[in-house]
Image (cartoon, helix red, strand yellow):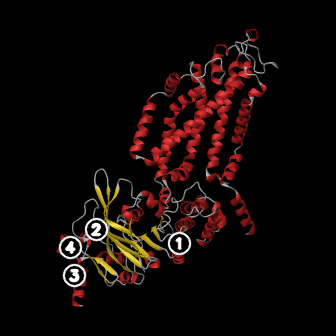
Amino acid sequence: MDDFKEHATDRGAQSQFGSIIFRFKKNKLAVFGFFFLAALALIVLTAPLYLDYSKAIRQNISQQFQSPSWKHPFGTDVFGRDLLARVIYGGRISLFAGLGVVLCDLSFGMLLGGVAGYFGGRVDQIIMRFTDIFMAVPSILLALAVVTALGEGTFNLIIALMIATVPRTSRIVRSSILTLRNQEFIEAAKCYGTSNARIIIKHILPNSIGPVVVTATLSLGSAILNIAALGFLGVGISPPTPEWGTILADNRQNILYYPYLGIIPGLAIGLSVMCVNFIGDGLRDALDPKMKK
Amino acid sequence: MSKLLEIKDLFVQYNTDTSVVHALNGLNITLEKGENLGLVGETGAGKTTLALSILKLLPNKVGQVTSGSIVYEGQDLVGFSEGEMRKIRGERISMIFQDPMTSLNPTKTVGLQVREVLDLHFNQLSSAEKQRKVDALFEMVGIPASRQHEYPFQFSGGMKQRIVIAMAIIAQPELILADEPTTALDVTIQAQILELMRRLQKEFNTAMILITHDLGVVVAICSKVAVVYSGQTIEMGTIEDVYSRKENHPYTEGLFKCIPDLKTESERLTPIIGSMPNPENLPSGCKFYDRCSYRMDLCAAKEPEYITQGTHSIKCWRFAVKWKKAEGLK
């Protein structure tokens, strides 16, 4: 009995946040993904401290198509630019613009979807008709149009991609809230005098976090890819600024003869998107209290 | 004793796209402080609608109070704004739901959920004080306080209902609306929960409206009972008035007949023939006319008066005539 009590208080002392961390740690892949991405982010963020930006953009034709060596660990491209430097500096845009897109996407998507789903009626109708209009246009075309109108630059790119993805996110959030709205515990919360804002934040959002986290991780992957696509189409990030997608696009003609030019930026994109998905999986399980073991 | 709640001639309707559903059609209830009222009636009689009307939680734009008053401590709640109601909900009137399985948030620990009521209404208390209150209440409802950090799925149905009761009572409201609190539980747990509710209610001197269709539950914890039929109070009185079975509304009489008798052996129960009138299309006279074995021509033509003798009120022409005569003789 004493043992039992001790155990119970032990567990009781664990905060909600602590138990989420505890459950997240159990998922080895997620932990790997987290550390890999963290290391990548650190390398990329601190790049100006140890790597000169000019190395990523200065052309030196005499050095073109060098295979990976000590001097150029990832080799060089058609203009003789060091691929390692380009991948590192490219990551700054790919990862952080991607993150920016997802954060904006999530905050606006959750706000719009949350309001539409919770209040329903006319508000819902208005918001959903707007998302219908936006969803009628293919998202990449929409982003293209917006970025053309706003002009080039990372910030405008984030805005454009956000506008293209918010409708989908708000729909997902709305649908998960619709199923929650009529649950008895929401009605119970109303009976205890809880305000609407508090019900949304404290009761509805924690219950809808699962699908939202999954959406977020998927859209981080697609955001990275969309940034690359826009770069390839010549809008958004303009050359010679490196960015994973544009690096890939720039080297397209030479990939057949110099595979490392495709493999390395491709790996950068693939690995980081994969790690994001691992983290998403781990988070989804960790946020579900029923997984508490 | 002073009046806590007086509902007079309350009419509530639900407007749907195709029809108007008359859920409450002149419902009357009075409740004193600290008193327990059992609200009995069959499915669709308007019991839950009544609870939602008191808390003003009728579905937006669909549910509508068309006339009547809900006077709570001298104030008519019908005219209250949403903001004013929010201060009343949970703090002065709270509710216990039918199904404890779904009335707790699955992603929050039960302790936090009980505590949230304090956060909402007694935010001036310090964190430690709130915690002490929560701990004390958990012990009171019979759950070790050490288990408050667990999630709803880790508890059984009866324990969850204890937690729901803790949430309802922590702010020490003057009135608790219990909407079939024991229906989802098995009989032994039911007895425990009823015992718990009776104890807490005495301790906190809280009034309670117990909504149920179980006449046995009512007699276990209530001092007063109201029988609702087709959105109307057809009979209200003390337990003695109603359960002595001397003078009852024909419907109540029928309800008692439905209860199996332990002493006599019978193959079948005696049901009340027929069913409740369609709330979309109500008869103009007595709502029970079609099923009543005492019906008279007057009943179909005119709605009976709600007549009171002492503590006992009945809405039936038989008693209206009889009781008035008795009064005349005095």
**Residue placed furthest toward the bottom:** B330
| Label 4 crowd bin: few (<14), some (14–19), many (20+), radius 10 Å | many
Tag 3: amino acid:
Val
Q: Amino acid at mark 1?
A: Ile
Mark 1 or 3, nearer chain start: 1
- Where is mark 1, residue-wise? B193
Q: Give the residue drawn at x 63%, y 40%.
A: A280
* Dot 3 alpha-carbon crowd within 10 angstroms: few under 14, some 14 to 19, many 20 or more: few
What amino acid type is highlighted by mark number 2? Answer: Gly
Q: In which image quadrant can residue B232 be found?
A: bottom left
Farthest residue, direction front: B124
Residue to which mark 4 is pinned = B299
Q: Chain of mark 2?
A: B
Q: Within the image, what quadrant is residue A247 found in?
A: top right
Q: Residue at x 41, y 37 (%)?
A: A129
Residue matched to label 3:
B321
Q: CA distance from mark 1 to mark 4?
A: 41 Å
Pick the front one: B252 or A104: A104
For discs 3 and 2, the disc positioned in front in the rendered view:
3
Q: Residue at x 48, y 62 (%)?
A: B87
Q: Which residue is under mark 2?
A: B274
Q: Report the Cα–Cα distance between label 1 and label 3.
A: 42 Å
